[in-house]
Amino acid sequence: MRLPEDVKQVRWALGLSGGADSVALLLKCLEAGVRPVALHFNHAFADENGDEAEAFCRTLCAALGVELIVGRRQVGAQERGSKESRARAARMAFFAREISATGCVGILLAHQADDRAENLVLRLARGCGAEGLSSFGWGGTVPGAPSLRVWRPLLDETHAEQVAWLEARGQCWVEDVSNADVTIPRNAIRHVLVPLLPHFTSGANASADLLAEESACLTRLAESATVSWTEQTLELRPETDPVLARRALRKWLPNVMTRQQTEALLALSANGVTQVEGGIRVKRVGAWTWVRL
């Protein structure tokens, strides 16, 4: 386990689902002398055992003397997106709100090596480049709240190692019933693909590390190709390679750019205008300058 350097100097939250990984992370933190604020989010899906997981987390934290804050998804009349994306969005919004409310600097999440490997495959299927395929790393920020930190202490360990660690201590956890549903792409990777490829997790994580290094290199090259970068204007050097231009455009408008929208900006003729996500209109001025309108 690799905790952030300041974990004993500032206050951290911890995402506690009740599953093996997050329970192991909480107990390992306590053994290391770190007492985070536990945050549990009940997704309230009718076909899952969310209430069981919530009750387990309440009992566990009460026994350990750990502060626990519980949130629950409010079901909207017209929810959009996949079940997994809706759950993640609601969970992250809850995390952001409670991290700030409790005076924490960020949240410790129990993502481990298997999660990162699965994420790489999911992003590969979506057509991501090096930046997306590098998946997540040790640190990051909470989506929509860049001032709040994310840290993943278990990223160099596997799910099997967490299970073995808990079993050796006689500690139970709650298994999410949805984990067995192979119609969910992440579960299909876990239950169908991984058994066919014994070295899948280690190999995929090695690839993600390499891709992260290459992505960082491309970002540096894109920065060197940039003449001017403000909130309103991006100007690149003449004849900038399209690969670097795409990277610069995505960094310029990081929260609104999809691959298709990036290509649309590159394809604009001089004085052409297009609209990207969020209602932002962008105009291409000359060959290598884009301006937000």
Image: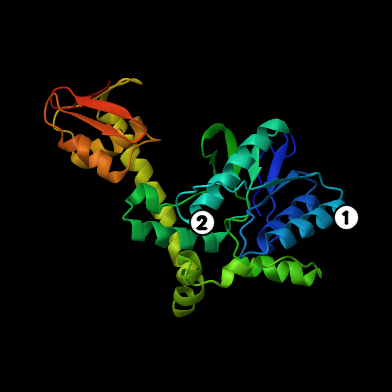
Q: Residue at x 34, y 36 (%)?
A: 277
- The x and y percentages for residue 76 are 55, 46
Query: Which disc number belongs to residue 147?
Result: none
Give the mark nearer the N terminus: 2 vs 1: 1
- Left or right: where 130 falls relative to 24: left
- Distance between mark 2 and mark 1 Cα atoms: 31 Å
- The x and y percentages for residue 173 are 74, 65
- The x and y percentages for residue 119 are 46, 58
- State the residue position of label 2: 84
- Left or right: where 211 falls relative to 177: left
Q: Amino acid at mark 2?
A: Glu
Answer few, some or many: residues within 10 Å of disc 1's Cα (few below 14, many 20 plus, some between 14 and 19). Answer: few
- Label 1's element? helix
- Left or right: where 142 falls relative to 188: right
Q: Quadrant of the N terminus?
A: bottom right
Query: Which disc number belongs to residue 63?
Result: 1
Q: Residue at x 38, y 49 (%)?
A: 132
